[in-house]
Image: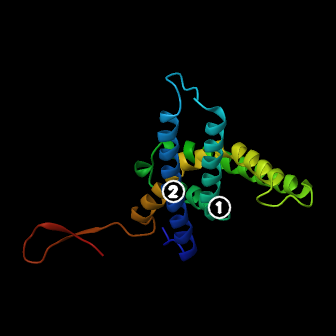
Amino acid sequence: MPAPSDSHRALLKQLGRFLRDSQKILDSWDAYSDEHTDLDGWPYDEDAYGRRASLRDAATAEAFESVRDGAHHLLATAQIQLTHLPARTVQSRWVWQLGVLHEALDRLDALHEKWLETRDSLPADARPGTEAFDDALAAHHAEAWSSLDDWATHGHAICDINTTARHAPSPLAPPPTTTAAPGTGHASTVRR
């Protein structure tokens, strides 16, 4: 399998950073939620809980921005790599996970287009920091969060496929040959 390009490696690094950052965001959210809800999961203070959820949504969206432009490339490359891997090296969950990632990215693309339309329809004085802008952006982040969470949960499949593809034997490499080792009369494998 050909070596990944520098741009693909850079995209994988960005994905790895998103996966780490989103895990930290989720861990922080889980700790907050555990501390600020009753045993049935109801928040003690719904307004404070909602504001904290909004911060989680915004932080996750911000973390994904470095991946957004390359996400289609990452998925397409993983799909190609997957089709070229020896069957014994493929995890059965990868096909399903790539499907989840495709669907999540389609939703994120649609939500991004919707956000651009919403942003353009806001009053002229609605800028970041104003209530109208910030409320609309928070609603956008809330809608996008479950799709971003899908990427945080299943994005590692892209990295796993890439790692497996890098370590898989090349389908074009000749099989190792067996010859007698000089002076032993025993067959040994000669690696090229």
Circle 1 crowding by C-alpha within 10 Å: few under 14, some 14–19, many from 20: few
Pointer 1: what residue?
A: 65
Find residue 188 and report its horizontal and vertical position in percent. Answer: 17, 68
Between residue 65 and residue 159, name the one nearer to us. 65
Q: Quick check: can you spot residue 80?
A: yes
Classify residue 77 by image quadrant. bottom right
Q: Amino acid at mark 1?
A: Glu
Circle 2 crowding by C-alpha within 10 Å: few under 14, some 14–19, many from 20: some
Classify residue 192 by image quadrant. bottom left
Horizontal placement of 27 versus 71: left or right?
Answer: left
Question: Residue 21: which numbered mark, if any?
Answer: 2
At horizontal 59% and vertical 58% (from top left) the residue drawn is 63
Between residue 157 and residue 165, name the one nearer to us. 157
At horizontal 51% and vertical 56% (from top left) the residue drawn is 21
Q: Quick check: can you spot residue 114?
A: no
At horizontal 27% and vertical 72% (from top left) the residue drawn is 191
Horizontal placement of 111 versus 70: left or right?
Answer: right
